[in-house]
Image: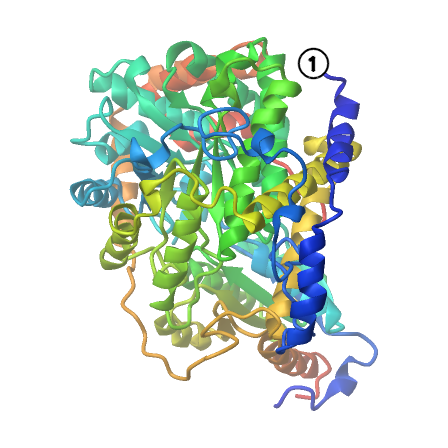
Amino acid sequence: MVEPSSFWSEKLKKLEERDKSGDPQYKKWKTEVLDLWNHGSEGKEFTNSSGIPIKELYVPGDLDGDLNERVGFPGTFPFTRGIYPDMYRGRLWTMRMFSGFGTPEDTNRRLKYLIQHGESGLSIAFDMPTLYGYDCSNERAEGEVGKCGVNVSTLKDMEVLFDGIDLGKVSTSMTINAPAIVLLAMYMAVAKKQGVPLDRISGTVQADILKEYIAQKEWIFPPEVHLRMIRDMMVFCTENAPRWNYISISGYHIREAGASAVQELAFTLADGFHYVEMGLNAGLSVDAFAPRLSFFFNSSINFFEEIAKMRAARRIWATVLKEKYGARNQRSMMLKFHTQTSGYTLTWQQPLNNIIRTTIEAMAGVLGGTQSLHTNSYDEAWALPSEKAVKVALRTQQIIAEESGIADTVDPLGGSYYVEWLTDEMERQAYSYFDRIEKAGGILNAIKIGYIQKEIANTSYKRQLRIEEGKEIMVGVNKYAEENEPPIKILRISKKAQLSQRKRLSDVLASRDQDKVRRSLERLEDAMKDESINLMPYMIDAVESYATIEEISNIGRRLYGGWKEPVIV
Amino acid sequence: MAAGKNLSLFRDKPVKVLLAKPGIDGHDRGMFVLAKAFRDAGMDVLYAGLLPTPEEVVDTAINEDVDVIALSLLNGAHLVVFKKVADLMKKRGIDDIAIVGGGTIPDADRPKLEKLGITGNYGPGTPLKTIIDHIMMRAEEARSRKLGIA
């Protein structure tokens, strides 16, 4: 392993030494043709979300050295052009529509609807009480049950959620973070009840707590407690559920919280490196666990910037895993990722325009080489999507996949002077952040002192001011706006969801074996007090006794308390 | 009263705003943008932190003697949770602190919130100036009541 303190700055130095002397023929063209043309581009500003100035033209001279070495071939190191040799020719990306609302019955119906319309993988959204480890009966859950996703308080809810869905056949992604270990335990318990062995289940829990402190702000305990739970899932799944991705290292929320593309890239990968080091510290060899690390990126509206970001992400990950962490297995170096189109870019105004935005963003995800994709629905600036809007979003992917021809060849933009230059530039700026994060004491410390959060809040505010000033256009919002738009039909979650969830919970509480619950919770508490114990079996035991998500979370709340974030603004 | 008519009210002490998300909702991007924008507009800005209860929001507003409580939710719970804040204020007999709202609030819900005295209720894409002007207008009402000149 290379001495960590020098790794990032050495790399950065090398990238900065790339030859930028330019192309004499380009200079000739610029003075003799372009400068004489002068048709109104001067004074205009061309930059992307990362603040990178964009030139009018990119030429071979913008690309230093041996392009083949850093771009290479798909399916080979450094995977810039894609992780598989044939990419979508062999198998299309997984169309994975994030869904969840109301009661487990409601969501079960939506999942079956999506499967019936050609969706190839499940993706579950949970409501706020579940995400923060509260039961639906908690006073704070009032008005929130089933609103932003499906509510799950006990194993009973999970049994209903997956009723009639064979967990040995589907892959399921669950967007759950702070209580990820509890939901994974429930999923494993449902699989057991269906007679599906653990080594057959496949899917993902998001579980990336670092980005919660950075962006989405859904934590329960101090960082170290959550990190220990991730370590336990990592070790347990590596040994028992080898097809389960116990973490999805997520840039999506970092971006939605206001980061630029390059910040999303850098902070997400920095989180990823932290998890690699955690696995190594837990005594696992890098090639034993790194192949199961997966990522989740945002695809926003600046088309080429997103594509360059995804290509750069693959190259950086492969290079660092190989050179810094000593990976030898190619699969450890392959950055595989899910993509979701940007919720932030969707407008409340003229909502049908959102279909177009989502199409552009989805195309960027595909051209960026994603392994799975969620396309947002046009009504999502307003509410959780209606069935009609979800279908259009799914059809968008199907049109890209099966009509457009975009998926016919691997990395069609590879070799584009602009895209390759931008990929290099994103890479260089990411290393510059890695270097700064290291100087701030590593990613965990950078989060604790609020450095990362402040960087994002500053970018977000600057962008808002640019929109206010009309320097950045949002069609239908600060340009081409219309008065008195007719309202659209949106999905509303009825209060019945809360009532029926509370009813089911009280039935479970009345019918479960109280002694069994108490004993399982005591054993879990004892295990929590000893860092060296893996919590996973105790979690499975507790959920199988029908202990609630809040009872389980309360053990940690009592032992460790919560976490107060540093002042950001 | 139109905004900016009575700026002398704030000569000694600028408009003081408490930004809060009183539900179980961590979407704070908009709050942080507003905090910076309000500060740039000369206001004194407090942020209630992650997941404050309605009680905590009301306590902080009273203890800090703010002019306006600015509530935000993007999780669909505004009708229940904003109401809790308004009810608590009423129960404590506070009428010199204004409450405004914002977030993903469907058109149909706006009149219901207005009835509770929660105004604004702006959605995504609202210009900062619109929000700042509204805060100023409500702050003037609140400050006038505080000073007994309403």
Residue B8 position within the rendered picture, expressed as x and y whole percent measured from the top left: 78, 86
Quadrant showing the N terminus of chain B:
bottom right
Residue furthest right as drawn:
B12
Residue B85 position within the rendered picture, expressed as x and y whole percent measured from the top left: 52, 62
Q: Looking at the image, can residue B57 be seen?
A: yes
Q: Which residue is drawn at the image coordinates 57% and 15% (left, top)? A: A327
The answer to whether B64 is drawn above or below residue A19 in the figure is below
The answer to whether A285 is drawn above or below residue A46 in the figure is above
Occupied quadrant, residue A58: bottom right
A386 vs A327, left or right, is left
Q: Which residue is drawn at the image coordinates 45% and 74% (left, top)? A: A476
Q: Chain of mark 1?
A: A
Viewer-closest of B7 and A7: A7
**Residue corresponding to mark 1:** A1
A50 vs A99, left or right, is right
Q: Looking at the image, can residue A545 be seen?
A: no
Q: Which residue is drawn at the image coordinates 69% and 64% (left, top)? A: A30
Residue A389 position within the rendered picture, expressed as x and y whole percent measured from the top left: 27, 58
Q: Which residue is drawn at the image coordinates 64% and 55% (left, top)? A: B48
Residue A311 position within the rendered picture, expressed as x and y whole percent measured from the top left: 53, 39
Q: Amino acid at mark 1?
A: Met
Quadrant showing the C terminus of chain B:
bottom right
Viewer-closest of B150 and A388: A388
Tell me how the rendering is colored: rainbow
The answer to whether A131 is drawn above or below residue A325 in the figure is below
Q: Secondary structure at mark 1?
A: loop
